[in-house]
Image: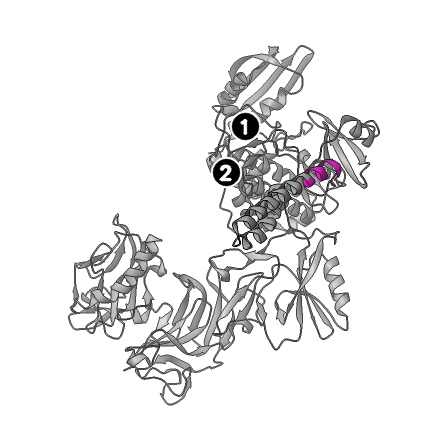
Amino acid sequence: MASMFLYLLSLLLFPLFSSAQTHRNVTLGTSLSTNDKNPYWASPSGEFSFGFYPIQDVFVLAIWYEKIAVESIIWTANGGNTVESGSKIELTSDGVLSLSTPNGTQIWKAESMDSIGVTSAAMLDTGNFVLSSDESAIKWASFDIPTDTIVPTQILNPLGKLSARLTQNDYSQGRFELILQGDGNLVLYQKARPMGDNYDGYWDTATTNGSQLIFNQSGYIYLSLGSGNTNRISLTPTTQVSPREFYHRATLDFDGVFRQYTYPKNSTGGRWRQSWSVSEYVPLNICTAFGGSALGSGVCGFNSYCKLDDNQRPQCNCPPRYTYIDSNNTFNGCKQDFLPQICGTSDGFELREIPSTDWPTSDYGRFTSVTEDWCRETCLDDCFCAAAIIREGTCWLKKFPLSNGKTDPTDKGKALIKVGKSQLVLNNRNNSCKKDRDNLILPGSILLGSSMLFNLLLISVICLAICGFRHKKQHQMRQDPPSISGMNLRSFTYNELEEATDKFKEQLGKGAFSTVYKGILESNPQSLVAVKRLLVYEFMKNGSLASFLFEGSRPDWYQRIQIAFGIARGIVYLHEECSSQIIHCDIKPQNILLDDSFNVKISDFGLAKLLMSDQSRCTTDIRGTRGYVAPEWFKRMAITAKVDVYSFGIMLLEIICCRKNVERESWDENTEILSDWAYDCYVENKLHLLVENDEQAKNDGKMLERLVMTAIWCIQEDPSLRPSMKKVTQMLEGAIEVCIPPVPDPSTSLAQYVLRINSYIPITSCFLRTLKWWKIYVIILINVPTISNNILLAVWHYMKTLSNLIFLSIFPNGLYFNYRLMKRKK
């Protein structure tokens, strides 16, 4: 709040500073710093300034209208990027205009064709900042390299362009350009970020002989045709206010609209409003301008739609059950707040209507002479259908992501958006009780203005009502067994569970600590349950993720992706959205259950660790399952939520490859440990080997690479290098870029390898000996009675120093031999 106040104060005071500064040429060796009292050079009239413009606690090197209180920047240097306090702009002794950071590093300079002979710089009254020689020859001018704005007397020559800023408050280059092409056509383009290539134009003058875009002194903008000045195309109304009374500028705004603005120089007795007013703009409707190009997102981001507000400016909206990717930038697109549909299932989804709305460039199917009901049913049954458009008997199916969305009042059709029916809602008994109490107290508070006697009687009645209500609730809790599908809990006796499971007859599975049995509750015969250690769970028809991945035929690639997304979102909920953070400590496929629609449910919180709101880490004994346990468990380090991130990374690789992290029966030592093999395939650009028999995955190369890179980030040995699960979710969904991951420390997989070797038979201690023979190290593990965790840890850390390893384990019942050549990656 304080920084915002100072920022607004600086905007109000900035114009006042310049009145005290007279014009003079800027000589060689002169500099400005953000720390100066007046960090700018003003024009002779004081109407324009060049220097550091404050934006909260940073600055942008810019030119602006000095006498206007509102932000009126017309040009920026350094690509519009901000600089920190202490930065400096200097006209050096050799005639170079140079911008440097506080430590003296040059980050921008005025690129002059010939800096030799430059003797001074000046801010002119036209708004042009120039570098000149003694003969007043202009060597460099800001007018020649405009950013997003032109002003009167400025000309845009062939191949000249304006580049919109990224957002209203971010001056770096954005998504739109206005270019006067070499063929004479003036065109507005959407840019492909981050490379900067142009998509198809969305507005143009359709000319072949345009020679200059001229903003003359009278405030008129026109495209000059040919060499003469008589043939022109005007971009300005025939009547225009005088530059003697108004400031003028024309800006390609961040929303892709080229607008001409005016601002009154004097209030003239309140006749003119003291703000920038739009006098003309193109295109007339930016929302409908992008119908021709199949590339890019349009003025609004993907999965959103554009609608003009009362001021004819674009407003970006999210469809139902979609939310903004960035709530501070509504032009950045929207994302689903529900799990996408899995192919082969249609339950759990519905269609929401948006009138007169379309995404014209997202079609993948069209059907004529059909009814709306047919269109609805077809979209619901098709897992690739994100939306459908029904218009006069024609049905269009739209694929994800939806692009170039628009609302057009003249459109007689309507959009049908596919969304998930249900959201994750946890019923909190305390909240419901509080709501019930509020319902009782509210009418009571209204009546508390009467006599004292009445108030006492009223208070007594309210107290009795609350007590009676609580007693009734408690009685209902004891007498009415709620269904499993509700979030309420109830206790069962051993006899009830024995009866429900038919004396524990049908076994569903067996874990490390107990067996799971199938049962039917007498109170709800339609719902099946699973009973484990006297705990009752909702029965999951599709079983665990382990059986889904490792048993039977290879599951569908896209279905696996959605399951991975669902697991990640579930862990985010445990880590960041619960009132107290929960570290699961045992994330693995066996603890991920799948319901009828393959929706994910995370189970088995027997090892979970609950942290208070003021805690971020804890110290505890080793928990979890071999192969999924993070390295810090063995290092006696404080345990954080990053242990779940590690486990998720291992499991993500298993989901990708449909195989376990360690395959003991593998005869290829390079593929035996999945985490090692996956990294090898990544650095060698051979990710197709991970999904050798999966054509869907091979054809989805970008998604495959993103998933593998995300997994490698998750399994970094150093917990500080692993992303949070929220960031992991964003990486998976493509909301943020996945950077190149570093090499996971080989000791991570070696520790699991030692544990794997020692899991063949119970070992209670060991004798360690190393031999060096032809640069190959031999580790001999001889079973003596028990091995402690400390000895295993010592083995692990010792192996980090070795390049090649051979493991030799000798047990009383025979000799087990295994080897692994470990090539360290530099």
Question: Is 359 on the left-hand or right-hand side of 153?
Answer: right
Question: Is 311 on the left-hand or right-hand side of 391?
Answer: left
Which residue is nearer to you in this view: 788 or 598?
Answer: 598
Q: Earlier in the sequence, mark 1 or mark 2?
A: 2
Q: Is residue 240 above or below residue 771?
A: below
- Which mark, by number, is residue 722? 2
Q: Position of residue 149 (x, y in %)?
A: 36, 71
Question: Residue visible at 53% across and 28% down?
Answer: 631
Question: Residue visible at 60% across and 36% down?
Answer: 650
Does residue 739 appear in the picture of this structure? yes
What amino acid is found at the position of numbered circle 2 in the picture? Answer: Arg
> In the image, which residues are magenta?
472-483
Q: Position of residue 248 (x, y in %)?
A: 33, 77
Dot 2 crowding, Cα within 10 Å, few <14, some 14–19, many 20+? many
Dot 1 crowding, Cα within 10 Å, few <14, some 14–19, many 20+? some
Element under disc 2:
loop
Mark 1, residue position: 822
